Image (cartoon, rainbow, N blue to C red):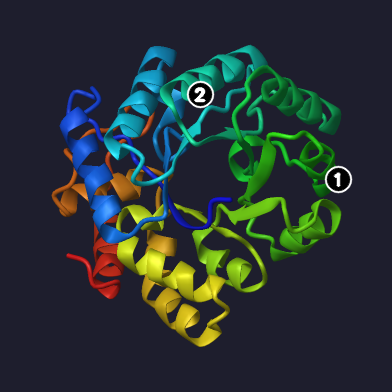
Amino acid sequence: MFRGSMVALITPMKEDGSIDDDALAGLVEFHIEQGTDGIVTVGTTGESATLDEAEHCAVIRKVVELAAGRIPVIAGTGANSTTEAIALTRCALEAGAAACLLVTPYYNKPTQKGLFLHHKAVAEAVAIPQILYNVPGRTACDMLPETVAQLAGVANIIGIKEATGDLQRLHQIRRQCGTEFAVYSGDDATGCEMMLQGGDGVISVTANVAPRLMHDMCQAALSGNRQLAQSLDQQLAGLHAALFVESNPIPVKWAMTEMGLAAKGIRLPLTWLSDTAQPKVKAAMQQAGIG
């Protein structure tokens, strides 16, 4: 089981929007040095929606190669087409990823039966550990705990990234799926409390900017040290909010350029962080002792 602070890694790009392999190599080393517990590549924060299939697979291969077994790599391979999700998941398996993260199909608004059959089909087609990803604020579709429980019965579906921010979901999923089924927070603002209540970690946007602090906070929370975990999380609270002042990953990409770790590159329809929002992100970085 993966545990702790797992960064939802940005996909660094040059100003022309092409993928910056040199910066990607630097980011992998940065996270290993800073104690990040796992890398999630080409998820929402990695701009999966604007990478074509060849680019998507190439980034997964590159990150696995760069990590070289020193840190687990979880590949984002979700899609709103089941056949595309299977193809991307096969790429991740062939690349040597440790697991895959599959977002619920977005835009087409499947029923709970459709969600079950979609994820079951991907899991049965590709023999790699798979983590469900529920983020209704992005997808217009909410995978209910009852559906999660059905999918937990599929051997290689091992957990869920739950990004509703509703802590009751943790307990509902635990009751129906048991403690062997992993539950990760996909909401930085409530991640600390979720771990203190029994969650297994956070798949984090904030960890891009403050990886060491996120790792330390997660370790404190997982060990049940509420006082230390909340103290560390308080330093991160500004980032948890400011990194969503505009649509993710707009703010985090700006922050990474401020840290000298990435160039000013992002793909339309996303745009660069507005001048009015930049001071908010900068202040949150300073609160966390960065920059």
What is the tally of numbered marks visible in this picture?
A: 2
As rendered, which of 202 and 143 lies closer to the eye? 202
Packing grade of label 1 (10 A; few <14, some 14-19, many >=20) is some
Kindly give the residue lying farthest to the bottom in the view shown.
227
Circle 1: residue type:
Glu
Pick whichever of labels 1 and 2 is earlier in the sequence. 2
Is 12 placed above or below 283 here?
above
Q: Nearer the viewer, mark 1 or mark 2?
A: 2
Horizontal side of 224 relative to 119 (left or right) equals left
Helix, strand or loop for disc 1:
helix
Is 104 placed above or below 92 here?
below
Is 40 placed above or below 174 here?
above
Find the distance from the CA under tag 1 to the CA under tag 2: 28 Å
Horizontal side of 105 relative to 284 (left or right) equals right
Residue 211: image location, x then y, percent = 33, 60
Residue depicted at x 30% and y 30%:
65
Circle 2: residue type:
Leu
- Quadrant location of residue 191? bottom right
Q: Which residue is mark 2?
A: 93
Residue depicted at x 21% and y 37%:
25
Horizontal side of 129 relative to 117 (left or right) equals left
Is 57 placed above or below 140 here?
above
Q: Which residue is mark 1?
A: 146
Residue 227: image location, x then y, percent = 50, 87
As rendered, which of 161 and 105 lies closer to the eye? 161
